[in-house]
Image (cartoon, rainbow, N blue to C red):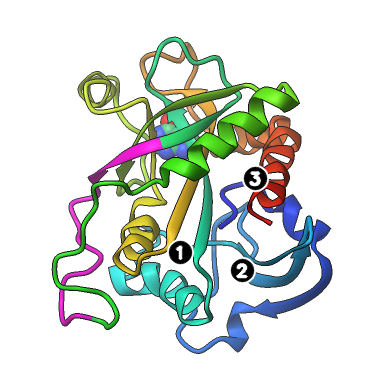
Amino acid sequence: MLGTGLGGLAEKVERPIVVPYREIPGFPETGVAGHRGELVLGRLEGVAVLLQSGRFHLYEGHDPETVVLPTRVFHALGIGTLIVTNAAGGLSPTFRPPVLMLIADHVNLMFRSFLAGPVVPPEERFPDMSEPYDRALRRLAREVALSGGIGLEEGVYVGLLGPSYETPAEIRMLQRFGDAVGMSTVPEVVAARARGMRVLGISTITNLAAGISPTALSHEEVLEAGMAVAADLERLVRGVLRGIG
Ligand code: HPA
């Protein structure tokens, strides 16, 4: 799953088959700049991949079920490993954006559940969330970063509904909860774990969060910062794919 401004990887897929969302039942069109709205199937580093270019956010007004529909579809297609990327604001004052952050865990502050309602088999009623982000995949990502000279922080991602950025007071509160803040990823990871998929999560810390940053936040800044580390992110993901393959 490619986060804001990170869609470039989709163009590097070998022997691509592109499926626009409008051809997929139940998939709405995406409306956020930096998110395209298509699936790209093919190969990267010798591994069969399906790239989701453009995700559905709660802040767009989508139901929780719509937000997790792609994850459920990917699992039903036989996909066992999910790599999620996103753009996030840095809560940790030691982060120097733009920089990549391996997601160690998350906090759901979206005040929504993504699995409420009738159980959707093979999901269970009360899925375990004790290791949302796979330990072995995190170790692999750290090794790839170390050997490739890629700067990689690690920390807890706090997911909020958005779409307004946070206030400085909210950021002071969130600093007790985690290391990065964003508006995505939590739904997909919860749905993936409920289906037993292995998950690797990587945030691009595009900015210091409100109140820590000396300047006002803007989506343009987020897109620009995302592009600045896109090459690092691509190398990291490719290295992880080689390790998996
Ligand atoms: N807050 C929330 N989401 C974000 C931010 C932020 O500062 N930067 C990029 N996505």
Asked if 243 appears above or below 99 in the picture, the reply is below
> Which of the pair 221/243 is nearer the observer?
243
Q: Which numbered tag is attached to residue 130?
A: none
Crowd class of label 1 (few under 14; some 14 to 19; many from 20; radius 10 Å): many
Name the residue located 75 percent from the left edge and 51 percent from the top edge.
Answer: 8
Residue at mark 3: 240
Please state the horizontal and vertical placement of residue 62, each as a whole percent of the image: 35, 69
Tell me: residue 42, above or below residue 5: below
Q: Which residue is mark 1?
A: 56
Magenta stretch: dominant secondary structure: loop
> x, y (%) of residue 75?
46, 74
Foreground tag (2 vs 3): 3
Q: Residue at x 15, y 77 (%)?
A: 117
Of the pair 29 and 115, the residue shown nearer to us: 115
Q: Is residue 150 visible?
A: no
Residue type at mark 2 is: Gly
The question of residue 110 being in magenta is answered with yes
Above-or-below relation of 109 to 54 = above
Question: Which picture quadrant has residue 231?
Answer: top right
Give whichever of discs 3 and 1 has the lower sequence position.
Answer: 1
Is residue 170 left or right of 7 when viewed as pictured?
Answer: left
Q: For the residues marked 2 and 3, what is the alpha-carbon distance in whole angstroms?
A: 24 Å
Nearest the eye: 184 or 190: 190
